[in-house]
Amino acid sequence: MSVGTVRVVIPVFDEADNVRDLVEEIASIPSLPLKLHVDFVDDSHNDRTVKAIESARNQFPLVTITYLHRTGADRTNGLAGAVTAGMRRALTAGHEYVLVMDGDGQHPPAVIPSMLSRLRPDTDLVVASRYIPGGSHEGLDGNYRRFISRAATWIARLLFPIRLRKVTDPMTGLFVVRASSINPDRFEATGFKILLEMILRTPELRPAEVPVIFRLRNAGDSKAAAARGVEYLNQLVRLRLGSLRLLTRRKEKHTYVNV
Ligand SMILES: Nc1nc2c(ncn2[C@@H]2O[C@H](COP(=O)(O)OP(=O)(O)O)[C@@H](O)[C@H]2O)c(=O)[nH]1
Ligand SMILES: [Mg+2]
């Protein structure tokens, strides 16, 4: 199926050593149904990543590349804030779909065509899942990280069995969503889990999944830290309470909503 314009939002924090390879991979995706516009949202405390983005833009002129370097007080809400800022920019620019992917090479750009081709009139969101046949999470370093990721996914699906019925990988940062289906003003996430936030804050989203094999991070270090676990549990509680409030409000209006 051919789709309209796609904005690829790539959050980056100190990814100067990964930007060039990533753009090269995006530029060499065969048989793309459309032209991609890549927008980096950079929260680095120096200009190295921005310089790498500018040099990749010169080297691969066939890919449209823009960036937002958030500095000082604009650097709000970490990774989730950066993705939300990128979504707002995509909406302002009038793109039809927003595809979010990491900038460290863990998300293979080669999966983009299968994500786009899974979009349908009755599907607003396509999640690239490590947990369906054909997918794998072998790119997460170490059994401990893999266990944490699995456990976090399991808790979320236990707490939101209906909303996450069709989403086996709500923790991933690789997905594409119809821009007109989302309202970034509803998102309050401060940490890593913007997809979960988006799904739970947008009950009308109709999701599907395609498999993906996560790779190892290319260069540099992960920014995921133990403190993020606590932040994540906070987010789950907030979302769970928020859904109950939404349920009560809708019941008052005699409308049933699955949460
Ligand atoms: N703009 C922005 N990007 C971030 C931030 N934290 C992480 N990232 C980027 O988000 C992506 C995923 O982060 P990463 O550290 O690889 O997390 P992991 O894959 O869970 O280990 C990478 O492209 C990071 O550079 C942040 O605070 N702001
Ligand atoms: Mg990573």
Image: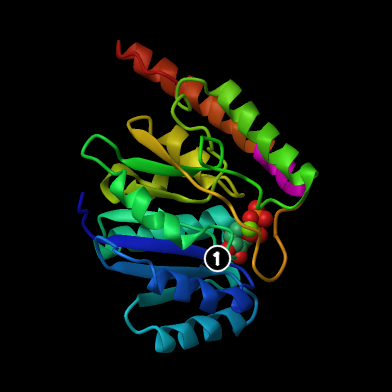
x then y, percent, for residue 202? 38, 35
Position of residue 132 relative to residue 83, above or below, is above
Front residue of this view, candidates 233 and 6: 6
Residue neighbourhood size for the residue with mark 1, other residues' Cα within 10 Å, grouped as few (<14), some (14–19), many (≥20): many
Give the residue pinned by disc 1: 103
Q: Position of residue 176 (x, y in %)?
A: 38, 50
Q: Residue at x 71, y 42 (%)?
A: 146
Image quadrant of residue 29?
bottom left
For image coordinates 35% across by 76% down, the residue present is 63
Determine whether the beta carbon of the residue marked 1 sits less than 8 angstroms from the nearest atom of ligand 1.
Answer: yes
Disc 1 secondary structure class: loop
Identify the residue at image location x=38%, y=30%: 203
In this rendering, position of residue 217 left or right of residue 42: right
**197 up-or-down from 80: above or below:** above
Please indicate, yes or no, whether residue 127 appears anywhere in the rendered image: yes
Q: Quadrant of residue 186?
A: top left
Task: Answer left or right for 198 relative to 238.
Answer: left
185, above or below 72, in the image: above
Q: Magenta stretch: give its range.
A: 226-232
> Which SS does the magenta portion mostly show?
helix
